[in-house]
Image (spheres, rainbow, N blue to C red):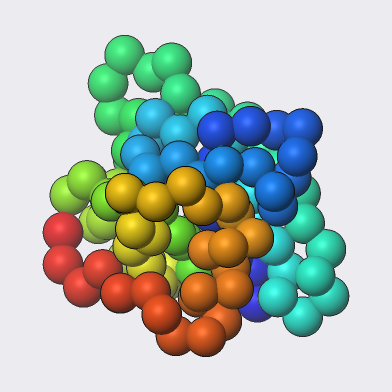
Amino acid sequence: MKVMITTTEIERGLDSPFESRFGRAPYFVIVDSDTKAWQVYANPALRAGGGAGTQAAQFIADQEAEVAISGDFGPKAYKTLAAAGIKMFLGPTGENLTARDLLDRYRSGQLKAKNDG
């Protein structure tokens, strides 16, 4: 299963700091939970004048992610991700966490699912 986590850095991969914004997150780390292989992608919608959440959501869907973890998802991003069958989970925004921390919390069932736009 591919899990996407929003981050602020590209260089440290899974040890990159968590970014709470979805559509304006600088980077996406996508982890294969079976093989533990991961890849970091620059958010192609980062500098979009409008519709960044929708564009970012489409990019995540194109990468075949099945789970998205971020601090929040706007209504249009939510709708796009939900239409693609991607489950959304909310990472805590008041803590200094890495993508690895969020992946561990997801695996242990500690993250709240985002159930509405």
7 or 28: nearer the viewer: 7
Closest to the observer, 90 or 50:
90
Task: Give the residue at x 45% y 60%.
Answer: 69
Rendering coords of residue 94 (x, y %): 31, 49
Q: Tell me the quadrant of the picture where the N terminus can be found.
A: bottom right
Residue at point 34% right, 58% down? 92
In the image, taking residue 76 as reference, residue 108 lies left or right, namely right
The x and y percentages for residue 35 are 83, 75
Eyeballing the image, is 47 above or below 5?
above
Quadrant of res 88: bottom left
> Is residue 55 at all visible to an observer of this figure?
no
The quarter in which the C terminus is drawn is bottom left
Numbered-mark total: 0
Q: Can you give x and y, in whole percent of width and height, for residue 26 in the image?
A: 52, 29
- Does residue 41 appear left or right of residue 53 in this picture? right
52 left or right of 14 in image: left
Residue 104 falls in image quadrant: bottom right
Residue farthest bottom in this picture: 108
**Vertical arrangement, residue 72 with respect to residue 82, above or below:** above
Q: Is there any visible trace of residue 9 in the rendered image?
A: yes
Q: Residue 29 versus residue 91: which sits nearer the camera?
A: 91
Residue 71 in the image: above or below residue 103: above
* x 35%, y 39%: residue: 21
Q: Position of residue 36 (x, y in %)?
A: 80, 70
Q: Residue at x 51, y 74 (%)?
A: 105
